Amino acid sequence: MTLENGTRLGHYEIRSKIGAGGMGDVYLAQDTKLDRKVALKILPANVAADRNRMERFVREAKAAAALSHPHIAHIYEISQQDGLNFIAMEFIDGRTLGDYLRDSNPEELPRVLRHLQHVAEGLARAHAAGIVHRDLKPDNIMITRDGHAKILDFGLAKLIAPQQSGLTGGEPSQQATAILQQHSTPGAVLGTVGYMSPEQAQGKTKEIDYRSDIFSFGC
């Protein structure tokens, strides 16, 4: 279901649709209470209906929301309105690191390295708090107009259901999130082809920790 411009979800007013993916549609919205722009992720109905998955997600999202770091996009709240479950997040005006890298030239290497330093600092902060991203890739990193890198979607990776994703061609950063059956317990583990650590690719979920993010960062 596509939300029309002007639709109200609590104190958020939809302005435009800015993205879509396995984790649901993303809208630019106006927070009418605090007079600021936010990004609203509308969770797919089948995800919201899975109580166990939502409970795990809420726990992890709360931990991610507690992170305060200039290179991690903030999660403002998780809420429900008119039967829709959504996440209000920091709206970042810029472009993805993937787009930036595709358009950059060798002379911009120092700037690229600075962006990567920002990402490393954000990861270190999250890992110190015991939070693992699980799907780190250039398209989950935004570069702001003033040149700062921000990591998106901490805590959201567990939400994608197997039937929502598949493998496609193209560059690794553009490929859909791959779903692999776990070897240890029922369920699924995910990552993006070209950025998954070996333990992710083998479905060894109990072995996934901060080192998996470091592997993805190196890719």
Image (cartoon, rainbow, N blue to C red):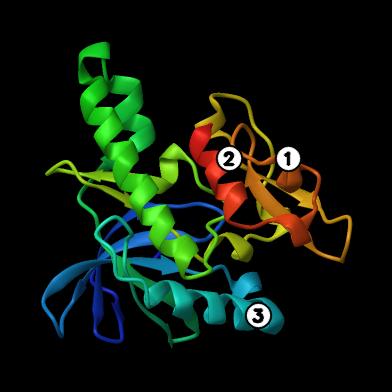
User: Residue at 29% of width from left, 31% of height from top?
Assistant: 113
Q: Helix, strand or loop at disc 2?
A: helix
Q: Are marks 3 and 2 in contact (CB under 8 Å)?
A: no
Q: Are marks 1 and 2 in contact (CB under 8 Å)?
A: yes
Q: Position of residue 64 (x, y in %)?
A: 44, 72
Sequence-wise, which precedes: disc 1 or disc 3?
A: 3
Residue 169 position by quadrant:
top right
Badge 3 crowding class, 10 Å Cα cut-off, few under 14, some 14 to 19, many 20 or more, is few
The residue pinned by badge 2 equals 215
Badge 1 crowding class, 10 Å Cα cut-off, few under 14, some 14 to 19, many 20 or more, is few
| Image vertical order of residue 21 relative to residue 115, above or below | below
Q: Position of residue 36 (x, y in %)?
A: 14, 71
Q: Does the image show residue 4?
A: no
Sequence-wise, which precedes: disc 3 or disc 2?
A: 3
Q: Amino acid at mark 3?
A: Ala
- Residue sitting nearer the eye, 155 or 22: 155
The disc placed on residue 49 is 3
Q: Amino acid at mark 1?
A: Pro
The residue pinned by badge 1 equals 198
